[in-house]
Image (cartoon, rainbow, N blue to C red):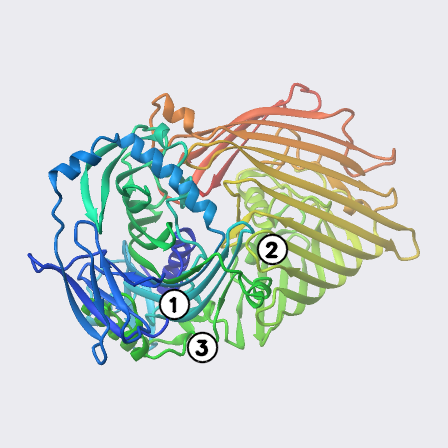
Amino acid sequence: MKSLINLFKIYFYCLLFVLVIFQPYSLFSQSVNIVGRVFDKDTKQPIAGVRVEIQNSNKGTYTTSSGFFRLANISVGTKLVFKSIGYEPKIIDVQQGKDSIIVYLTASVVKLQEVEKIGEIEVDEVVRRAIKQKRQNLSKLNTLQAKVYTKLFLELGGTGFETKYDSSTRRVTFSTTNRPKSKEDSLMIEFVRNFILETFSNVYIDYPRKFQYSEITQRRQTANIPKEFNKIILTDFLNFYNETVKIVNTEFVTPLSDDAFKYYHFEMLGKELYGDLYVYNIKIVPNTKLYPVFSGTMKILEKSYNILEVDVAPSDNAVIDFLDSLRYIQKFATLNENLWHPAYLELRAKIKLGLVKGLFEFGLLLRSVSIISDAIVNQPIPDSILAKSEQAVVVVSPKADSTSLEFWQNNALIETSEKEKQIYEKVDSLAKKIDTTLLRPFNQNKKFDWGFYSDIGELVGYNRVVGYSLSLSPYLEYSGFKLTASTIYSFGQKKLFYNASISFEPKHNSSSLKFSLFTKPAIISLERKMSTTLSSIFAYLFHWDYYDYFQKQGFKIEFSSKNNQVEPYSKFSLSYEHSKDSSLLKKTDRSLFSKAVWRENPQITEGDFDVLDFKFSIGSSLELFGFEIGKSSFSYKIDLNLLFGKKVNGNPFGAFKPQIELQIPTFYTGYKPMYLNLLFEYGIETKETPLQYSFRMPNAWGFGSFQTANTGLYGGRRYYAFHLQHNFSDLFWRAIGLPTYKGRGLEFSLLFSLGYFSTYGETQIYKPTTKPFVEYGFGFSRIPTFVSDFLFWGASFKFNPDRKASKGLGFWLELSFPF
């Protein structure tokens, strides 16, 4: 098989996906001058997870599996406190000229009578008191300013593919594995297998105001990943104090939630000493197979009932998309006067991304550690930080990438292992041999670029008016300016269309200005439920041409802008267009498998027009790789479209089209909750509005369409539509024991749609409905494709009791993502 695609692009998109859905945690740091190791005095074995902190302060760290620790800016005479469950605490003075220390801790001896004295309390009562103390901790914490260090290690692997390095072109290619491996191939496999990312950051959180802001002050990463990807900071620690924690699309009830006893039961494993107090070692046992929960252990301090440590993994019945295994270790530390907060978080995960089973499969081992090295609580956040947060939630300091190797050797809170040193050296060495244009999609500093748009929908098209069409779309880009010249030849119309444009989008700016000059086929009506690419595919393969068309010749000036915030997002565009519009005739009745007669292409209002088009959207949906993704919490989307125009030597006209979509969670399921989707649409336009700007009843597929209506039949000057969908998730499917796929069942939905279209009595392209058009039905989703972990089938069926006005029965089949 020939080389399929640049390996970097595939790996980086998968890596970016992982960094998005497994949003690790927070980070921060400064210079360090004390390093050491902690051992068991009797066994001489290293002790992991020892809390090392400056006495009477919030500054500290934890030891690694090798007993290693490092602390920054420690003054001579400072007292370091070493505390670990099961060991006697120890205090050591920092001495002049001694920046490396070895510490031995003595195992605690638990006296039998003391155990009996505290053993009277039941384990459930311990947990109840810990839940109460958790609430008090949360109520005490208003603001947090923290210095956090995070380290992320990723190891990639896959099946069906390997890398090949061509020394003549200095390029890496992605190919099948049925060929001998060269030495260069083996080196390149190692080059793309391991990624290391480290960051120090300042984190600012105001909990009552839900304010979060973070600044990455130092960062480094292996040379096989662009620095722009190294933003492993989420402005908030994953906190088991919360009622639930969300991992990808799975929402776990925590063992200290108010409803903990509905989902867990607890067993006392024993007691250990932590300083002068005892610690309850409690086993967390799931008591449900229906909801995702954790299993593992937690350790709770006597008297105060603060949680010291949680070590958990998802239960056997919990399903997390793309994860084979996962383990969380979280440790808590006192910040001031019995106020405890997470200070250490370790995550280990095994991820499997099955793009195409047996062919495109990517395995990923992930380990991340995040440590709060210093913290200030309940102090006002500086006004300068509040002002910066209005522009962005996460920023990178201009000097973040200027730190030297020596800085990381002296300051990293987690030591660099010999394996990691070898990875850094090998990747850095190999990176010097690779053409840097491999990173072009991620190189934001590149000024000049050129190429051809390769979207199949832009290259090849088909419909009953244009017939077959071929397109060539070269572009030139320099310092924010882009020149595009698209030519489209229509074999049906036997003519050449074109669309030339020049646009300007300033660097690091979400606004753009574009000027276009065109003669092109355009879509009749303001309805755009289906992409033109899919419309072409359906027309050619299934003899279903969704749209109607006309010719537009003229120019357009458009300004658009969108915000940089994840939520709420907003989009805005304002355009002026002058065009000569003319009708086009149908040119074919033929598709690949049919010669049935297609509907005629309607005639439009011909003439010269000046049109001002305003569009605005705001909402809380998310976008990932260009796909809009609904949230598991309440979300909304509001769209407004205002159109004003005038026919040359004619009357002015206008149209107004608002819509609002709501997604309302109804019941907790542990995965995406049961939810109610509501869509309200309205449209009105003047009698003088050209026919090509009419409203049309959509019947593409999916939520917001009418499946029992004939394509291109109903429409008008005024309309309203209401759509309702309640997704009951797969909870009932799993509850009654029906067969599951990877632990999940089919999701069931109920559907309802109502629409009404009317005119002012004049002749129209589309017919008005004489009464409200009503549909109801049901659907199933999350149907396995069995060939990919990313794609699932969805099927819905809708019925209309009015057989004269509709087809009576309509259905659609679609592909969807699991998130």
Q: Quadrant of residue 497?
A: bottom right
Label located before the other in sequence (2 or 1) = 1
Could you tell me residue 754's position as x and y percent? 68, 28
Q: Secondary structure at mark 1?
A: strand
> What residue is at 25 percent from the left and 65 percent from the top?
80
> In the rendered structure, which amino acid carries the disc numbered 2?
Ser
Q: Quadrant of the N terminus?
A: bottom left
Q: Is residue 335 left or right of residue 705?
A: left
How far apart are the two marked residues, 3 and 1, measured between alpha carbons? 12 Å
Mark nearest the camera among 3 and 2 is 3
Q: Which one is in front, 773 or 292?
A: 292
Mark nearest the camera among 2 and 1 is 1
> What residue is at 30 percent from the left and 28 percent from the top?
287
Q: Which one is in front, 395 or 749?
A: 395
Q: Which residue is mark 1?
A: 200
Q: Quadrant of residue 55?
A: bottom left
* Category of crowding for the residue at label 3, using alpha-carbon neighbours closer than 10 angstroms: few (below 14), some (14–19), many (at least 20): few
How far apart are the two marked residues, 2 and 1, measured between alpha carbons? 53 Å
* Category of crowding for the residue at label 2, using alpha-carbon neighbours closer than 10 angstroms: few (below 14), some (14–19), many (at least 20): many
Q: Secondary structure at mark 2?
A: strand
> In the rendered structure, which amino acid carries the disc numbered 1?
Phe
Q: Which residue is mark 2?
A: 469
Circles 2 and 1, Cβ within 8 Å, touching? The answer is: no
* Category of crowding for the residue at label 1, using alpha-carbon neighbours closer than 10 angstroms: few (below 14), some (14–19), many (at least 20): many
Q: Is residue 182 left or right of residue 640?
A: left
Q: Is residue 95 left or right of residue 28?
A: left
How far apart are the two marked residues, 3 and 2, measured between alpha carbons? 51 Å
Q: Which one is in front, 442 or 164?
A: 442
Q: Which residue is mark 3?
A: 399
